[in-house]
Image: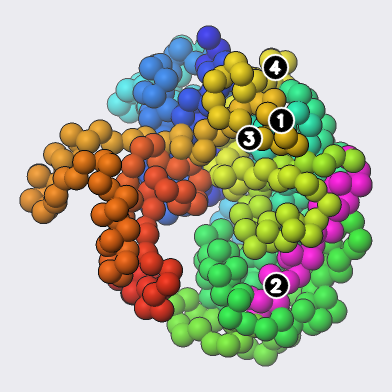
Amino acid sequence: MTAILGISAFYHDSAACLVSDGDIVAAAQEERFTRIKHDARFPRNAVAYCLKEAGLRVNQLDYVGFYDKPLLKFERMLETYLDYAPAGFRSFLKAMPVWLREKLWMPDVISSELACVDGASDKREAKKRAKQFSFPILFGDHHESHAASAFYPSPFEQAAILTMDGVGEWATSSIGFGRGNEITMLKELRFPDSLGLLYSAFTYYTGFRVNSGEYKVMGLAPYGEPKYVSLIKEKLVEIREDGSLRMNHEYFGYGAGLRMTNGAFARLFGEPPRRPESTLTQKQMDLARSIQVVTEEVMLKMARYAHGETGSKRLCMAGGVALNSVGNGRLLREGAFEEIWIQPAAGDAGGAVGVALAIWHRYLDSPRNSAEKSGAWASRTGGGIAPYADGMKGALLGPQDKESEIEDFLNARRLPYKKYPREELPAKVADMLAREKIVGLHQGRMEFGPRALGARSILGDARSPRMQSVMNLNIK
């Protein structure tokens, strides 16, 4: 058995994944254990869970993979600071200490952190124990990790691969092609031009938190009108036919500063950024709709270009922009591909899956598991059975609680409950929903990624005009 641990950490959405002979045994984000949203710290708890699920200790791992290349990222940061100097000096001073202390020494940091997972009680013991580990620590390119997370778990023998996010080392979007256990990267868009950062600029300007509030902008868009599309295209970004971008960086602050937008951006739209938690106005809704329209245009053009470059009928997607479900819907309806498979943990967390699978398939040149071999569910394509199983197992890769553990939790806190036979639950839940009750669904293994897919979900009756406000006020 070959055990591979994949890790993403230190930027946002830290996560771990354990792959055994090409099979994803477990994957989870650190935030699910610490309850710190988008926790960026080393995923000690997620690693411990993955090892426990596989029945392994740290020293039994064969390979450890990290989802990007810190030295290349450091190179990009230094070149950017030099390009913008002296404007980026404050950002430079804030970023450098953590790089000089930790991120430039990533193999040592990872080994020491894994020693802590293995039981080391302090830094001295961690360093001593880390020297005893025999596994190599390998580093994957950020967008190649995204590409691997998209293609290898898919049911496709071959497919175009499209990755889109803020930025990895240098790439901000990439096009690749997968066949069997091989992935070839074909094209990339480079920093500072980025669809993900363009969307995040509007996330910041409309008063939401970057790297977490983008879904709120997408949800706000249907309430607005695309009033600013022409202004965005005229002043902020040139969109080419292949989907590549050229941004006017006079209006953005992320290259040199600590904010996504600057004073020129605020003057262009006539007011400063909205203060977080302040009242939303129609203007924010119109801005959200406008950037959503622009984003969908870019996604469609990139996808059509990828189709032309690869000739494939199938597309796999990952990267934070691939979580834009509205844009994905348009790709499916209006794009050039017959089928699309999207990594459920499309953001940085999914990089842990990608780098682990890339080590197994690319570094070790191992074949992919067939649907027949795995005995798992396989999607039907073109009237036949897809050659590969759903490698993500429905994204149900996280921890699960035993019924006895749930009862102990409720009893310890003296919380009232009533136990129903499983066959009675569907009717009981349906009755509660019909009476406009809110139902929390907790069953099986936890989902990996940001989407609630039925294992950890909040349910409400969508027919009720009150339900959205009730949920937002009482829960969110």
Mark 1 residue type? Gly
Q: Nearer the viewer, mark 1 or mark 3?
A: 1
First to last magenta residue range: 287-310
Question: Measuring 61% from the left and 46% from the top, which residue is drawn there?
Answer: 346
> Does the magenta run of residues contain 118?
no
Query: Residue 379, which numbered label?
Result: 3
- In this rendering, the answer to whether 93 lies above or below 316 is below
25 left or right, relative to 35: right
Residue identifier under label 4: 367
Which of disc 4 and disc 1 is earlier in sequence? 4
Question: Measuring 75% from the left and 36% from the top, which residue is drawn there?
Answer: 382
Where residue 255 appears, as percent x and y from the top left, is: 71, 62
Q: Nearer the viewer, mark 1 or mark 2?
A: 1
Q: Can you tell which quarter of the image residue 120 is in?
A: top left
How would you classify the magenta stretch by its main secondary structure? helix
Q: Nearer the viewer, mark 1 or mark 4?
A: 1
Query: Residue 291, which numbered label?
Result: 2
**CA–CA distance in space, label 1 to label 3:** 9 Å
Which of disc 2 and disc 1 is earlier in sequence? 2
**CA–CA distance in space, label 4 to label 3:** 19 Å
Residue identifier under label 1: 384
Marks 1 and 2: CB-CB under 8 Å? no
Which of disc 2 and disc 4 is earlier in sequence? 2
Where residue 199 appears, as percent x and y from the top left, is: 67, 66
Q: Label 4 crowding class (10 Å Cα cut-off): few <14, some 14-19, many 20+?
A: some
- In this rendering, the answer to whether 446 lies above or below 133 is below
